[in-house]
Amino acid sequence: MRVHRSPAPWSSPAAPPRAPVAGLVLVLAALLLLAPLAAPPTATAAGRDGQDVHELTTEDVDTWLDGLVPALLDAERLPGATVAVVSGGEVVTLRGFGAADRPRPVPGATPVDPEHHLFRIGSLSKLFTATAVMQQVERGALDLDADVREHLDFPLELPRGAVTLRHLLSHTAGFEERLDHLITPDAEKVRDLRTELAEDPPQQIFAPGTTPAYSNYGLALAGHVVERVTGVPFEEYVRAEILDPLGMSSTSAEQPLPPALADRMAGGFPAPDAGPAPFEHLSVPPAGSVSSTAADMAAFLNFHLGHGPGNVLGAGTMATLHSPALPPGDLGGLGAAEQMTLGFRGHEVRGQPALSHGGDTYLFHSELVLFPEADAGLFVSLNGNGVRALSTAVLRQQLVDQFARRYVAPPEQAVPGPPPGAADRAAAVAGHYRSQRRAESSAAALAGAFAVTTVTAGPDGTLEVAPFMAPPTTVHEVEPWLWREAGGTATLAARADDDGTVRDIALVAYRTEGRVGAWHGLFVPHVLLLAALLVLAGTLVAWPVNRLRRRRRWGADRSGPRPRRVRRLAYAAPAAVLAGVVLFVSSVQPDLSLVRPLTRLGQAVLLLGVLGAVPAAWHLAGTVGRRAGLVAVTGAALLTLSLVYVAGYAVAFRVLWPDISI
């Protein structure tokens, strides 16, 4: 085995304008489908661009990485990256690029060392949880298809149906989203796993096995089931049963890290020019607490390619883990393009079956991909955020796509012509869709309202797919209700009723998108809310100005005490609404927890404000009754309508809901 880990050359380009901190990408998850293992492709196979597929040698991979990764880090202004590539059970290369202790690779910075520096791997931790579950299935302690409540010591309401480990590992248990203090720098906020799962669990909003919806809670629940049947805390179980047998001595699920590893943790940088942020703690460790090096992750890659010790997981159990989790047809057409295995996302990259998973914290962003037919795998992790919200996703996608293009892709296949009826099916799919990974019963419902994908049909049966905050992609129908990107990796599968009505689509294996109306898809409710808030803010300015003007012109107000009180209540309402909004938003902390007293105060003030719609309507009636001028009537009408709209919005999007968990 030859390993090369030289750092990338330093560079110091002119600094572009400062960009905002990249946002949280909590949910990138996994890839699926297991095919029989095959020998790596030879150097004589034709590539997609008319070039030969390269042999996976250390020299070739190092040359490729040197020509790609430093340029991507510079372009996105990312601090550093750690990379592992494996093939045929061997480590092809381990590489470190950029800086481990500075936001930019500047002179004096410590280069990333792939064997020394630990990176947070986020949701890649779910693969360790899945491995742990399958170990207990193999040993007869767990049944994939039994009700998980058999192993819990706390009540769990499941109104849509019983949930199994198969559902949990494939993100089809039907749980809504909960992000409350999911990631926090404060170790004191991390409670024991049972308490975290038992207190205020998410509601079940879909029938199990019908609607993929990514769930950190679901995977954490699976990890707790392992704790319950073994009597061993999750972190200790992973170390004893997975890490130690695989020789992964530089990996840990503990929070904070053990002293022997803590000093080796790479810094995590929230923005290109920011200093390192504190260590991140996951409130549900089985969903994302693991820290590791590229060298250790190479061992994990080889293990899942079938080159690990047999005492960790047998070949038959491994094949089950890598196979589609649900029987064909359970998801209707949604499973046609991609489908979750018992842990991985199964899909294709440039025509090759792939098993993968992504992982993101606030600060670290990782990707793992296996190509079983090529017996090859790739791991990459980044220790910071770049100039754009999608900087890290761009780098990871580029790395995976070009790796497949260079080392495992078969010859280019011609895009088949559209099947009969393609234009009609495309028209049926066109519309707006909202992520089913959403909250429904709490204040987090507001966040999910913005994650809308717009699908537009072309006359030739193609679809243009534009996810929220992402560039559009054109996909072609390759079989009824299944579309693929020509020469790319994007897919769209649709689930249609018997009459051809499409209610949901799937772009990735772990999440579906449910149809919403154009009103919602074009963000009309949110635009109207902004307009209403602007009206209320304008009212706060206009009311005292108009009152002073009237006093100067007409003298004291002779309208009587009751109309004056009504008018004052009406015009106090905008101040209460705006103050309530500010208090509510201010109560949301960087770790997505809430300052509960501030949240409740914001709700109370906002409620008082929207109740001001009653005196506002009374004031409007009085204004019309005394035949005031057009300006006065219009102002009173806009005030009333704005307060009524804010009230409806606050109820519809759960801002005034009793459950304020997010």
Image: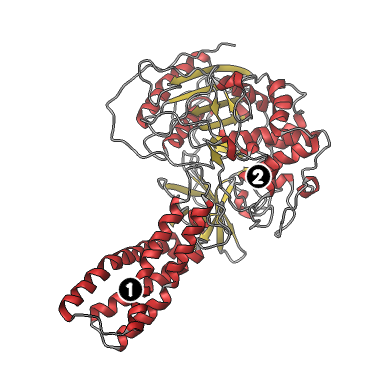
Q: Which colour scheme is used?
A: secondary structure
Image x and y of residue 129, in percent: 68, 35
Residue found 56% across the figure and 11% down from its top: 2
- Residue 45 lies, in percent from the top left, at 53, 24
Residue 638, disc: 1
Q: Which amino acid does label 2 sit on?
A: Glu
Are dots 2 and 1 in contact, CB under 8 Å? no
Horizontal side of residue 558 vs 485, given as left or right: left
User: Please, what is the three-letter code of the amino acid marked with disc 1?
Assistant: Leu
The answer to which image quadrant residue 306 occupies is: top right
Q: Is residue 134 above or below residue 648?
A: above
The disc placed on residue 196 is 2
Residue 517 seen in the current view: no
Q: Can residue 607 be seen in this view?
A: yes
Count the marks: how many? 2
Residue at screen point 57% across, 42% down = 182
Q: Which quarter of the picture shows residue 379?
A: top right
Q: Residue furthest right?
A: 140
